[in-house]
Structure formats: C-alpha cells, structure tokens
Amino acid sequence: MIRIADLNDLDEIVAIEKRVFRHPWSKNQIQQELKQENGKRVYAEIEKKIIGYIMVRVLKIEAQILNIAIDLPYQHRGYGKKLLDYTLRELGNETDVFLEVRESNLPAIKLYNEFNFE
C-alpha cells in the first residue's frame, strides 16, 4: 500500500535512510523535508510497516526527486518501481521531473532508465 508520509513517520524513515545509504540524510534534514509545503512524500508499507519512501520537491511545472529508498530486506522486489510509478502518475504529464544519481548506483540507474530518464 502506498500512502502520504508525514512527521509521524519520521523515525521509521530515518531508520531506513541509515540502513540503506552510506551517507544518509540527518534526522533534521528529513524532518525539514517532511515539513515542506511544496514537497510530495509517499511511502510503501506492508502490514503497517514502512518499507520504503520517495521524497519529491515540486516547483510549479517541474519536480525534483530528492531521495528514494527501499529497506534492505525488501529491495529487488519491485517496490521502488511501484513508488516511482505512483509518484510520476501523481505528478502528471505536465510536470518535468529531474533527478541526480551517482554513476556507481547501477540499480537506481536501471530503474530510472525504465522510466526513460536520461
């Protein structure tokens, strides 16, 4: 199930962030992003447990994907693809979406290529 994230989800999102990334965002950075009015934050959950999230900043007709993470036990099962697909459909065709990704992050690059990111 995909839901909108809010400050009540902060601790779970921070925990996933720390498990997934070598250089994670701080709790304060994530908290500030959850407070942004121009942000979209959604997460996937299984049996009321958050397993991943995506954070997007929307500025008029463009949006930037800031962060996407799927918790380690749930990776490579299609959850990242579902989150990204949901988010892109919510943004609609009239929004230009961009992102940055490390060249070494091959799984993310593969995912983004499936959605025709260049």
Image (tube, rainbow, N blue to C red):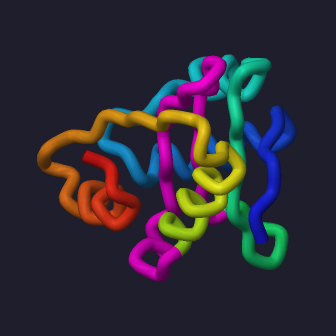
- Image quarter of residue 112: bottom left
- Give the farthest residue toward the front: 94
Question: Residue at image x 70%, y 40%?
Answer: 41
Main SS category, magenta section: strand
Which sits in the foreground, 7 or 61?
61
What percent of the width, then of the height, locates residue 3? 81, 57
What percent of the width, then of the height, locates residue 91? 66, 43
Question: Residue at image x 55%, y 30%?
Answer: 63
Which sits in the foreground, 51 or 96?
96
- Image quarter of residue 45: bottom right
Q: Quadrant of the N terminus?
A: bottom right
Q: In this view, does 35 lie above or below 40?
A: above
- Is 36 left or right of 99, judged from the image as shown? right
Q: What stretch is highlighted in magenta?
A: 51-78
Question: Residue at image x 51%, y 63%?
Answer: 71
Question: Residue at image x 21%, y 40%?
Answer: 102
What percent of the width, then of the height, locates residue 49? 75, 67
Q: Disc count in the image?
A: 0
- Give the farthest residue toward the bottom: 77
What percent of the width, then of the height, locates residue 115? 40, 60
- Image quarter of residue 89: bottom right
101 within the magenta span? no
Q: In this view, does 31 lie above or below 102?
A: above
Q: Is residue 4 above or below residue 64?
A: below
